[in-house]
Amino acid sequence: ERPEIGSGTRTKAIMETYGLTFKKSLGQNFLTDLNVLKKIVTAADVTADDDVIEIGPGIGALTEQLAKNAHQVLALEIDERLIPVLGETLADYANITVLHGDILQTQLSALIQEHFDGQHAVKIVANLPYYITTPIVLHLLDEEADFESITVMMQKEVAQRLTASPGNKDYGSLTIGVAYSTDSEIAFTVPKTVFVPSPKVDSAIVSMKKRRQEKYHPQNEVNFKRLVRGSFMHKRKSLWNNLLGLYGKDENIKNKLTSALNSSQIEPGIRAERLSVADFVKLSDSLEEQKL
Ligand code: SAM
């Protein structure tokens, strides 16, 4: 019996056997703590009823734990060197498929259609490469793909931004992007010492559960998203000043903005970080009425 991939000794042996080095440019910090790996699988609530997509399997530490619990696992890795390695480290598991590719260039819905049977819930689980955490999360949420949840490790600071409440210093357009379609929380935090090489910062597992029923219904989703981004453009400026930056400073526009703010009962002088998702939806709809 070989020790599991996520153990320190096995990880070291695999790196040596294949003459592998860690690619910093690809965010390669491998997890070498079986307890943490198993806790991620538990937090993601992966069972035999689920198909899992893993982003960035590395040498397969998390993949192995997922495969022990899931129906099927599809792992997408960008580093070509690791594909043959994964073929060997995961050879004992018939329910794993490894693909070579870049998650940001991958259409999730197509992947799900092509590889899964449609009879199992799809869950996304990963220890994300930190240099592109935000783009990956936005990419996953942007798609109409039919998955149930995202459970991913990221640096703690980003996790706090994703899950912040209005009024908190970490609250911003990213928080709203996540809260718009999911219920999210930090499942647990992880010290930097459980990775090789050890990153500079501590990490946290964030769980995002997609709502079955949409909670927010802005009249125009594209304009809603533009409003949110524009309102946080200059974080230290008031909402009013950001809105002028976004829509223009004409007297006519100012009048429309004032009406829209009035009818959504929002003080122009506050900062965007005080507004809930529902406030932004109200404001967006009022702006639609003003044809802005
Ligand atoms: N899952 C392994 C673990 O937990 O030990 C490795 C996690 S490591 C933090 C991130 C992994 O994502 C690396 O294997 C890296 O090569 C891969 N990766 C980086 N950018 C990627 C991308 N755009 N698409 C897919 N995988 C990527």
Image: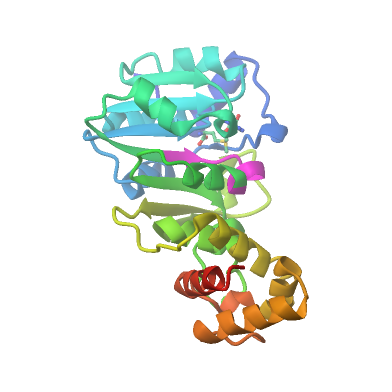
Asked whether 130 or 210 is in front, the reply is: 210
Tell me the magenta residue range: 125-134
Q: Is residue 125 left or right of residue 127?
A: left
The image quadrant that residue 217 belongs to is bottom left
Q: Quadrant of ligand 1?
A: top right
Q: Does residue 225 sit above or below 76 in this rendering?
A: below
Q: Is residue 40 left or right of residue 23?
A: left
Query: In the rendering, at what x and y percent does residue 144 appear?
Result: 42, 41
Please give the name of the residue rendered at 26% of the width and 29% of the height, measured from the top-left corner: 118
Magenta stretch: includes residue 144 = no
Q: Is residue 198 visible?
A: no
Please give the name of the residue rendered at 29% of the width and 40% of the height, measured from the top-left corner: 46
Please give the name of the residue rendered at 59% of the width and 50% of the height, measured from the top-left corner: 192
Q: Is residue 17 left or right of residue 210?
A: right
Q: Does residue 133 sit above or below 287 in this rendering?
A: above
Asked whether 243 or 38 is in front, the reply is: 243
Q: Does residue 196 sit above or below 155 in this rendering?
A: above
Quarter of the picture containing the C terminus is: bottom right
Q: Does residue 187 sit above or below 127 in this rendering?
A: below
Q: Is residue 219 left or right of residue 274?
A: left
Query: In the rendering, at what x and y percent does residue 250 appear?
Result: 77, 76
The image quadrant that residue 184 belongs to is bottom left
Magenta stretch: includes residue 130 = yes
Q: Is residue 207 visible?
A: yes
Quarter of the picture containing the N terminus is: top left
The color scheme shown is rainbow
- Report the number of numbered marks: 0
Query: In the rendering, at what x and y percent does residue 260 appear?
Result: 56, 79
Query: In the rendering, at what x and y percent does residue 128 appear?
Result: 55, 41
